[in-house]
Image (cartoon, helix red, strand yellow):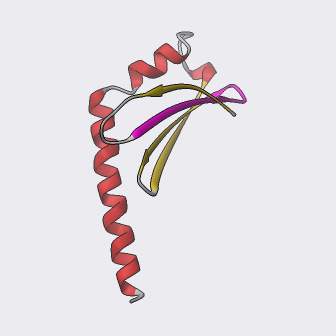
Amino acid sequence: MRIIAELPHPQCKISIFSMNQKYIVKFEQGPYEQSYKLAELDLMGGGVNEVFQIIDEEFITTVIERFKSMRTDFVTAYQKQQ
């Protein structure tokens, strides 16, 4: 797996990897991460530029909201054990 791009964003780290004819888009925020896999064959031939088009601000906003849910879920589960 090799990193082919990083997209700057103030709320999370966004990395794009290439591995086995797939693009892996990884979002990281603190201890949490989300990954999305796209087969190169599912794209129209635009390569990584097409991946950039998919990762628009609307999509990133939903990812950020999901991070908030992940954090809430984890805190709730952790507090049950205390």
Residue at 30%, 37% in the rendered image? 10
Residue at 37%, 60% in the rendered image? 70
- Compared with 33, 48 (above or below) is above
Q: Nearer the viewer, residue 81 or 46?
A: 81
Residue at 42%, 87% in the rendered image? 81
Q: Decide whether the magenta segment is chiefly helix, strand or loop.
A: strand
- Compared with 31, 42 (above or below) is above
- Compared with 19, 52 (above or below) is above
Residue 30: quarter of image: bottom left
Residue 68 x/y as whole percent? 29, 56
Identify the image quadrant of the C terminus: bottom left
Residue 76 x/y as whole percent? 33, 76
- Compared with 70, 23 (above or below) is above
Residue 16 x/y as whole percent? 53, 30
* Farthest residue, direction bottom: 82
Residue at 35%, 53% in the rendered image? 67
* Farthest residue, direction top: 45
Identify the image quadrant of the N terminus: top right
Residue 22: quarter of image: top right
In reply to whether residue 73 is colored magenta, the answer given is no
Q: Is residue 60 left or right of residue 13?
A: left
Q: In this view, does 13 lie to the left or right of 16?
A: left
Q: How many marks?
A: 0
Residue 62: quarter of image: top left
* Farthest residue, direction right: 20
> Which residues are drawn in magenta?
13-22
